[in-house]
Amino acid sequence: MAKKGKREIGEEYLKNLRPSKLDEYIGQEKVVENLKITIRAAKERGEPLDHILFHGPPGLGKTTLAYCIANEMGADIVASSGPTLERPADLVGILTNLKKGDVLFIDEIHRLPRIVEEFLYPALEDYRITILLDKGPHARSLNINIERFTLIGATTRIGLLTAPLRERFGIFHHLDFYPDSELIEIIKRSARILGVDIDGGGAEVIAGRSRGTPRIANRLLKRVRDYAQVKHDGGITGEIALDALKMTGIDELGLDGLDRQYLEVIIENYKGGPVGINAIGATLNEEVDTLIDVIEPYMLKTGLIGRTSRGRVALEPAYRHLGITPPRDIEKQLSLLDMDEEEKD
Ligand code: ADP
Protein backbone atom coordinates (compact mmCIF):
# COMPACT_ATOMS: atom_id res chain seq x y z
CA MET A 1 0.00 0.00 0.00
CA ALA A 2 2.78 2.38 0.92
CA LYS A 3 4.20 1.94 -2.54
CA LYS A 4 0.95 2.84 -4.22
CA GLY A 5 0.66 6.01 -2.14
CA LYS A 6 4.13 7.04 -3.21
CA ARG A 7 3.36 6.50 -6.86
CA GLU A 8 0.20 8.54 -6.58
CA ILE A 9 2.14 11.43 -5.13
CA GLY A 10 4.62 11.08 -7.97
CA GLU A 11 1.88 11.23 -10.57
CA GLU A 12 0.50 14.37 -9.02
CA TYR A 13 3.86 16.04 -9.46
CA LEU A 14 4.09 14.86 -13.03
CA LYS A 15 1.13 17.05 -13.91
CA ASN A 16 3.47 19.65 -15.23
CA LEU A 17 2.09 23.16 -15.30
CA ARG A 18 4.97 24.46 -17.40
CA PRO A 19 4.06 25.15 -21.04
CA SER A 20 6.43 23.27 -23.33
CA LYS A 21 5.71 25.06 -26.62
CA LEU A 22 5.73 28.78 -27.41
CA ASP A 23 2.12 28.50 -28.59
CA GLU A 24 1.07 27.31 -25.12
CA TYR A 25 2.98 30.14 -23.44
CA ILE A 26 0.51 32.78 -22.26
CA GLY A 27 1.37 36.49 -22.35
CA GLN A 28 4.72 38.27 -22.98
CA GLU A 29 3.47 38.56 -26.56
CA LYS A 30 6.28 40.70 -27.93
CA VAL A 31 8.97 38.45 -26.48
CA VAL A 32 7.30 35.31 -27.81
CA GLU A 33 6.73 36.83 -31.26
CA ASN A 34 10.38 37.90 -31.48
CA LEU A 35 11.56 34.49 -30.35
CA LYS A 36 9.43 32.76 -32.96
CA ILE A 37 11.08 34.85 -35.69
CA THR A 38 14.56 34.20 -34.29
CA ILE A 39 13.90 30.46 -34.10
CA ARG A 40 12.42 30.26 -37.58
CA ALA A 41 15.30 32.20 -39.12
CA ALA A 42 17.92 30.05 -37.35
CA LYS A 43 16.16 26.86 -38.41
CA GLU A 44 15.94 28.01 -42.04
CA ARG A 45 19.68 28.68 -42.02
CA GLY A 46 20.34 25.41 -40.22
CA GLU A 47 22.26 27.30 -37.54
CA PRO A 48 22.11 27.24 -33.73
CA LEU A 49 20.51 30.24 -32.02
CA ASP A 50 22.54 33.16 -30.73
CA HIS A 51 23.06 33.25 -26.98
CA ILE A 52 19.97 34.63 -25.25
CA LEU A 53 19.59 36.50 -21.95
CA PHE A 54 16.25 36.75 -20.12
CA HIS A 55 15.94 39.20 -17.30
CA GLY A 56 13.11 40.07 -14.95
CA PRO A 57 11.73 39.21 -11.51
CA PRO A 58 11.48 35.59 -10.35
CA GLY A 59 8.54 33.40 -11.36
CA LEU A 60 7.69 35.21 -14.60
CA GLY A 61 8.62 32.37 -16.96
CA LYS A 62 12.32 32.71 -17.86
CA THR A 63 13.10 29.03 -17.25
CA THR A 64 9.89 28.04 -19.01
CA LEU A 65 10.89 30.02 -22.10
CA ALA A 66 14.31 28.34 -22.16
CA TYR A 67 12.64 24.91 -22.22
CA CYS A 68 10.15 26.03 -24.88
CA ILE A 69 13.00 27.30 -27.07
CA ALA A 70 14.96 24.05 -26.80
CA ASN A 71 11.79 22.17 -27.68
CA GLU A 72 11.07 24.32 -30.71
CA MET A 73 14.65 23.88 -31.90
CA GLY A 74 14.43 20.12 -31.38
CA ALA A 75 17.49 20.45 -29.14
CA ASP A 76 18.42 18.97 -25.79
CA ILE A 77 18.70 21.29 -22.81
CA VAL A 78 21.02 21.09 -19.81
CA ALA A 79 19.99 23.26 -16.88
CA SER A 80 22.31 24.63 -14.25
CA SER A 81 22.59 27.74 -12.12
CA GLY A 82 25.21 30.35 -11.29
CA PRO A 83 25.79 29.45 -7.64
CA THR A 84 26.11 25.69 -8.32
CA LEU A 85 28.86 26.16 -10.90
CA GLU A 86 31.67 26.80 -8.45
CA ARG A 87 34.73 25.95 -10.56
CA PRO A 88 35.52 25.78 -14.29
CA ALA A 89 35.79 22.00 -13.87
CA ASP A 90 32.05 21.92 -13.14
CA LEU A 91 31.44 23.14 -16.69
CA VAL A 92 33.96 21.00 -18.61
CA GLY A 93 31.82 17.86 -18.65
CA ILE A 94 28.68 19.79 -19.51
CA LEU A 95 30.25 21.78 -22.36
CA THR A 96 32.10 18.86 -23.96
CA ASN A 97 28.92 16.78 -24.00
CA LEU A 98 26.75 19.37 -25.74
CA LYS A 99 25.76 18.55 -29.30
CA LYS A 100 25.42 21.16 -32.04
CA GLY A 101 22.47 23.43 -31.27
CA ASP A 102 21.92 22.13 -27.73
CA VAL A 103 20.90 24.63 -25.08
CA LEU A 104 22.82 25.29 -21.88
CA PHE A 105 20.52 27.09 -19.48
CA ILE A 106 22.14 28.95 -16.57
CA ASP A 107 19.71 30.39 -14.07
CA GLU A 108 20.85 33.23 -11.77
CA ILE A 109 23.71 33.82 -14.15
CA HIS A 110 24.69 37.00 -12.26
CA ARG A 111 25.88 34.71 -9.46
CA LEU A 112 28.39 32.85 -11.62
CA PRO A 113 31.82 33.05 -9.92
CA ARG A 114 34.23 35.28 -11.86
CA ILE A 115 36.65 32.43 -12.59
CA VAL A 116 33.85 30.33 -14.14
CA GLU A 117 32.61 33.32 -16.09
CA GLU A 118 36.05 33.92 -17.59
CA PHE A 119 36.34 30.25 -18.48
CA LEU A 120 33.04 30.57 -20.33
CA TYR A 121 34.04 33.52 -22.56
CA PRO A 122 35.97 31.55 -25.25
CA ALA A 123 33.29 28.84 -25.14
CA LEU A 124 30.66 31.43 -26.00
CA GLU A 125 32.65 33.21 -28.66
CA ASP A 126 34.90 30.66 -30.32
CA TYR A 127 33.36 27.40 -29.08
CA ARG A 128 36.60 26.45 -27.46
CA ILE A 129 37.67 25.82 -23.87
CA THR A 130 41.12 25.82 -22.33
CA ILE A 131 41.97 23.37 -19.61
CA LEU A 132 45.06 23.80 -17.43
CA LEU A 133 46.79 20.43 -17.05
CA ASP A 134 49.24 21.40 -14.34
CA LYS A 135 50.01 24.09 -11.84
CA GLY A 136 53.07 26.29 -11.46
CA PRO A 137 55.75 27.40 -13.97
CA HIS A 138 55.54 24.26 -16.10
CA ALA A 139 51.79 24.33 -16.39
CA ARG A 140 50.54 23.14 -19.75
CA SER A 141 47.17 23.87 -21.21
CA LEU A 142 44.93 22.02 -23.58
CA ASN A 143 42.51 23.62 -26.00
CA ILE A 144 39.36 21.68 -26.71
CA ASN A 145 36.86 22.54 -29.41
CA ILE A 146 33.23 22.18 -28.47
CA GLU A 147 30.06 22.12 -30.56
CA ARG A 148 28.19 25.31 -31.37
CA PHE A 149 25.68 25.48 -28.56
CA THR A 150 23.28 28.15 -27.34
CA LEU A 151 23.60 29.63 -23.88
CA ILE A 152 20.35 30.86 -22.38
CA GLY A 153 20.99 32.89 -19.26
CA ALA A 154 18.37 34.08 -16.81
CA THR A 155 18.82 36.79 -14.24
CA THR A 156 16.77 38.83 -11.83
CA ARG A 157 19.55 41.43 -11.63
CA ILE A 158 20.86 42.44 -15.03
CA GLY A 159 22.76 45.32 -13.41
CA LEU A 160 25.03 42.82 -11.67
CA LEU A 161 26.18 41.16 -14.90
CA THR A 162 29.70 42.12 -15.94
CA ALA A 163 30.02 43.98 -19.24
CA PRO A 164 32.08 41.23 -20.95
CA LEU A 165 29.47 38.60 -20.12
CA ARG A 166 26.61 40.82 -21.17
CA GLU A 167 28.31 41.56 -24.49
CA ARG A 168 28.48 37.89 -25.38
CA PHE A 169 24.70 37.61 -25.60
CA GLY A 170 23.15 38.39 -28.98
CA ILE A 171 19.54 38.51 -27.84
CA PHE A 172 18.07 40.18 -24.75
CA HIS A 173 14.50 39.95 -23.50
CA HIS A 174 12.99 41.56 -20.46
CA LEU A 175 9.99 39.86 -18.87
CA ASP A 176 7.52 42.11 -17.12
CA PHE A 177 4.71 41.37 -14.66
CA TYR A 178 1.55 39.89 -16.20
CA PRO A 179 -1.76 41.76 -16.29
CA ASP A 180 -4.66 40.07 -14.46
CA SER A 181 -6.32 39.07 -17.76
CA GLU A 182 -3.30 36.89 -18.65
CA LEU A 183 -2.99 35.50 -15.13
CA ILE A 184 -6.66 34.46 -15.35
CA GLU A 185 -5.85 32.49 -18.52
CA ILE A 186 -2.83 30.90 -16.83
CA ILE A 187 -4.90 29.94 -13.78
CA LYS A 188 -7.65 28.42 -15.94
CA ARG A 189 -5.09 26.45 -17.91
CA SER A 190 -3.40 25.18 -14.73
CA ALA A 191 -6.79 24.28 -13.22
CA ARG A 192 -7.59 22.24 -16.34
CA ILE A 193 -4.30 20.36 -16.05
CA LEU A 194 -4.84 19.74 -12.33
CA GLY A 195 -8.43 18.67 -12.94
CA VAL A 196 -9.94 21.40 -10.74
CA ASP A 197 -13.24 23.11 -11.44
CA ILE A 198 -12.90 26.89 -11.26
CA ASP A 199 -15.32 29.59 -12.34
CA GLY A 200 -14.48 33.05 -13.71
CA GLY A 201 -14.89 34.65 -10.28
CA GLY A 202 -12.49 32.18 -8.67
CA ALA A 203 -9.81 32.76 -11.30
CA GLU A 204 -10.25 36.52 -10.99
CA VAL A 205 -9.78 36.52 -7.21
CA ILE A 206 -6.62 34.41 -7.43
CA ALA A 207 -5.21 36.48 -10.32
CA GLY A 208 -5.77 39.71 -8.38
CA ARG A 209 -3.61 38.42 -5.53
CA SER A 210 -0.81 36.87 -7.59
CA ARG A 211 1.37 39.97 -7.85
CA GLY A 212 1.55 39.73 -11.63
CA THR A 213 3.49 36.46 -11.30
CA PRO A 214 2.51 33.08 -12.83
CA ARG A 215 4.48 31.11 -10.23
CA ILE A 216 2.49 32.77 -7.43
CA ALA A 217 -0.77 32.25 -9.37
CA ASN A 218 -0.08 28.51 -9.59
CA ARG A 219 0.91 28.35 -5.93
CA LEU A 220 -2.24 30.15 -4.78
CA LEU A 221 -4.38 27.98 -7.06
CA LYS A 222 -3.02 24.87 -5.33
CA ARG A 223 -3.68 26.30 -1.86
CA VAL A 224 -7.22 27.30 -2.81
CA ARG A 225 -7.75 23.87 -4.34
CA ASP A 226 -6.86 22.23 -1.00
CA TYR A 227 -9.31 24.47 0.82
CA ALA A 228 -12.09 23.89 -1.71
CA GLN A 229 -11.56 20.14 -1.49
CA VAL A 230 -11.59 19.95 2.31
CA LYS A 231 -14.21 22.59 3.15
CA HIS A 232 -16.43 22.34 0.08
CA ASP A 233 -17.07 20.01 -2.85
CA GLY A 234 -13.78 20.81 -4.64
CA GLY A 235 -15.02 23.49 -7.07
CA ILE A 236 -13.51 26.98 -6.79
CA THR A 237 -15.73 30.07 -6.85
CA GLY A 238 -14.81 33.67 -6.11
CA GLU A 239 -16.21 33.36 -2.60
CA ILE A 240 -14.32 30.17 -1.82
CA ALA A 241 -11.09 31.63 -3.19
CA LEU A 242 -11.52 34.72 -1.01
CA ASP A 243 -12.07 32.63 2.12
CA ALA A 244 -9.11 30.38 1.34
CA LEU A 245 -6.73 33.25 0.70
CA LYS A 246 -7.84 35.04 3.85
CA MET A 247 -6.71 31.98 5.80
CA THR A 248 -3.26 32.08 4.19
CA GLY A 249 -2.73 35.71 5.24
CA ILE A 250 -2.56 37.10 1.70
CA ASP A 251 -4.28 40.46 1.36
CA GLU A 252 -6.14 42.14 -1.52
CA LEU A 253 -2.91 43.33 -3.14
CA GLY A 254 -1.37 39.88 -2.84
CA LEU A 255 1.00 40.95 -0.06
CA ASP A 256 1.89 38.42 2.62
CA GLY A 257 3.17 38.91 6.17
CA LEU A 258 6.78 39.64 5.19
CA ASP A 259 5.71 42.13 2.50
CA ARG A 260 3.66 44.06 5.03
CA GLN A 261 6.44 43.96 7.62
CA TYR A 262 8.80 45.38 5.01
CA LEU A 263 6.45 48.33 4.46
CA GLU A 264 5.92 48.78 8.20
CA VAL A 265 9.68 48.94 8.79
CA ILE A 266 10.10 51.75 6.26
CA ILE A 267 7.08 53.66 7.54
CA GLU A 268 7.34 53.10 11.28
CA ASN A 269 11.04 52.55 11.99
CA TYR A 270 12.41 54.94 9.38
CA LYS A 271 9.63 57.54 9.10
CA GLY A 272 8.82 56.57 5.53
CA GLY A 273 12.45 56.73 4.33
CA PRO A 274 14.67 57.25 2.48
CA VAL A 275 16.31 54.24 4.10
CA GLY A 276 19.06 52.02 2.74
CA ILE A 277 18.22 48.43 1.83
CA ASN A 278 20.85 47.09 4.25
CA ALA A 279 19.20 48.86 7.16
CA ILE A 280 15.81 47.41 6.18
CA GLY A 281 17.36 43.94 5.89
CA ALA A 282 19.01 44.24 9.30
CA THR A 283 15.79 45.39 10.98
CA LEU A 284 13.79 42.58 9.39
CA ASN A 285 16.58 40.06 9.90
CA GLU A 286 16.12 39.11 6.25
CA GLU A 287 18.59 38.60 3.38
CA VAL A 288 19.00 41.77 1.33
CA ASP A 289 18.94 39.68 -1.90
CA THR A 290 15.51 38.33 -0.99
CA LEU A 291 14.21 41.84 -0.45
CA ILE A 292 15.63 43.07 -3.76
CA ASP A 293 14.65 40.04 -5.86
CA VAL A 294 11.38 38.91 -4.35
CA ILE A 295 9.76 41.63 -2.26
CA GLU A 296 10.59 44.89 -3.97
CA PRO A 297 10.01 44.52 -7.73
CA TYR A 298 6.23 44.30 -7.53
CA MET A 299 6.04 47.09 -4.95
CA LEU A 300 8.15 49.33 -7.18
CA LYS A 301 6.03 48.45 -10.18
CA THR A 302 2.76 49.20 -8.40
CA GLY A 303 3.98 52.38 -6.74
CA LEU A 304 3.89 51.27 -3.10
CA ILE A 305 7.53 52.20 -2.71
CA GLY A 306 10.10 54.15 -4.69
CA ARG A 307 13.85 54.02 -5.08
CA THR A 308 15.96 57.12 -4.48
CA SER A 309 19.68 57.76 -4.43
CA ARG A 310 19.55 57.59 -0.63
CA GLY A 311 17.44 54.46 -0.32
CA ARG A 312 13.82 53.35 -0.38
CA VAL A 313 10.81 55.53 0.36
CA ALA A 314 7.24 54.48 1.15
CA LEU A 315 4.71 56.15 -1.14
CA GLU A 316 1.16 57.17 -0.31
CA PRO A 317 -0.56 53.92 -1.45
CA ALA A 318 1.60 51.97 1.03
CA TYR A 319 0.34 54.10 3.94
CA ARG A 320 -3.25 53.73 2.79
CA HIS A 321 -2.85 49.99 2.34
CA LEU A 322 -1.66 49.57 5.91
CA GLY A 323 -4.31 51.95 7.25
CA ILE A 324 -1.73 54.51 8.39
CA THR A 325 -2.30 58.24 7.82
CA PRO A 326 0.44 59.53 5.50
CA PRO A 327 2.43 62.58 6.62
CA ARG A 328 1.19 65.86 5.19
CA ASP A 329 4.30 66.33 3.05
CA ILE A 330 4.10 62.82 1.49
CA GLU A 331 4.15 64.33 -2.01
CA LYS A 332 7.74 65.33 -1.34
CA GLN A 333 8.76 61.65 -1.59
CA LEU A 334 7.86 61.67 -5.29
CA SER A 335 10.40 64.35 -6.07
CA LEU A 336 13.17 62.18 -4.59
CA LEU A 337 12.55 59.25 -6.91
CA ASP A 338 15.17 58.07 -9.35
CA MET A 339 13.97 58.17 -12.88
CA ASP A 340 16.45 55.49 -13.86
CA GLU A 341 15.06 52.18 -12.70
CA GLU A 342 18.15 50.15 -13.58
CA GLU A 343 19.74 48.22 -10.70
CA LYS A 344 22.13 50.15 -8.54
CA ASP A 345 22.46 47.86 -5.58
P1 ADP B 1 11.45 32.05 -13.71
O1 ADP B 1 12.45 31.16 -14.39
O2 ADP B 1 11.29 33.38 -14.40
O3 ADP B 1 11.69 32.20 -12.23
P2 ADP B 1 9.59 29.92 -14.32
O4 ADP B 1 9.81 29.74 -15.78
O5 ADP B 1 10.19 28.90 -13.41
O6 ADP B 1 10.00 31.37 -13.86
O7 ADP B 1 7.99 29.98 -14.12
C1 ADP B 1 7.39 29.69 -12.89
C2 ADP B 1 6.13 28.87 -13.11
O8 ADP B 1 5.13 29.69 -13.66
C3 ADP B 1 6.34 27.73 -14.11
O9 ADP B 1 6.37 26.49 -13.45
C4 ADP B 1 5.14 27.75 -15.02
O10 ADP B 1 4.25 26.72 -14.64
C5 ADP B 1 4.46 29.06 -14.74
N1 ADP B 1 4.54 29.97 -15.90
C6 ADP B 1 5.47 30.90 -16.11
N2 ADP B 1 5.19 31.60 -17.24
C7 ADP B 1 4.07 31.08 -17.73
C8 ADP B 1 3.28 31.40 -18.89
N3 ADP B 1 3.62 32.40 -19.69
N4 ADP B 1 2.18 30.67 -19.13
C9 ADP B 1 1.83 29.68 -18.29
N5 ADP B 1 2.53 29.34 -17.17
C10 ADP B 1 3.63 30.03 -16.89
Image (cartoon, grey):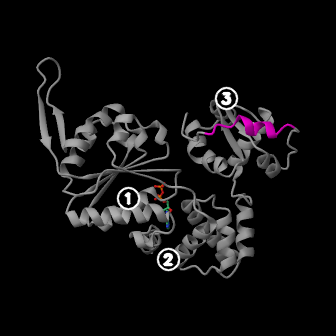
Membership of 330 in magenta stretch: yes
Q: Report the quarter where the C terminus lies.
A: top right
Membership of 198 in magenta stretch: no
Task: Report which residue position mark 3 lands on.
Answer: 310
Q: Report the quarter where the N terminus lies.
A: bottom left
- Residue type at mark 1 is Ala
Q: Crowdedness of circle 1 by 10 Å Cα count: few (<14), some, many (20+)?
A: many
Total labels: the figure holds 3
Residue range highlighted in magenta = 329-339
> On the picture, is 30 further left or further right than 249?
left
Disc ID at residue 219: none
Secondary structure found at label 2: helix
Label located before the other in sequence (2 or 1)? 1
Residue at horizontal 72 percent and vertical 37 percent from the top:
313
User: How far is the residue under mark 3 from the one under mark 2?
Assistant: 47 Å
Q: Answer yes or no: is residue 68 visible.
A: no
From the Cβ of disc 1, is ligand 1 less than 8 Å away?
yes
Contact flag, marks 1 and 3 (Cβ < 8 Å): no
* Residue 132 percent across, percent down from the top left: 17, 30
Residue at horizontal 50 percent and vertical 55 percent from the top:
175
Disc ID at residue 66: 1
Closest to the camera, between mark 2 and mark 1, is 1
Secondary structure found at label 3: loop
Front residue of 264 and 14: 264
Quadrant in the rendering for residue 135: top left
Label located before the other in sequence (3 or 2)? 2
- Residue type at mark 3 is Arg
Residue at horizontal 46 percent and vertical 36 percent from the top:
160
* Residue 147 percent across, percent down from the top left: 17, 51
Front residue of 213 and 90: 213
Secondary structure found at label 1: helix
Task: Report which residue position mark 2 lands on.
Answer: 193
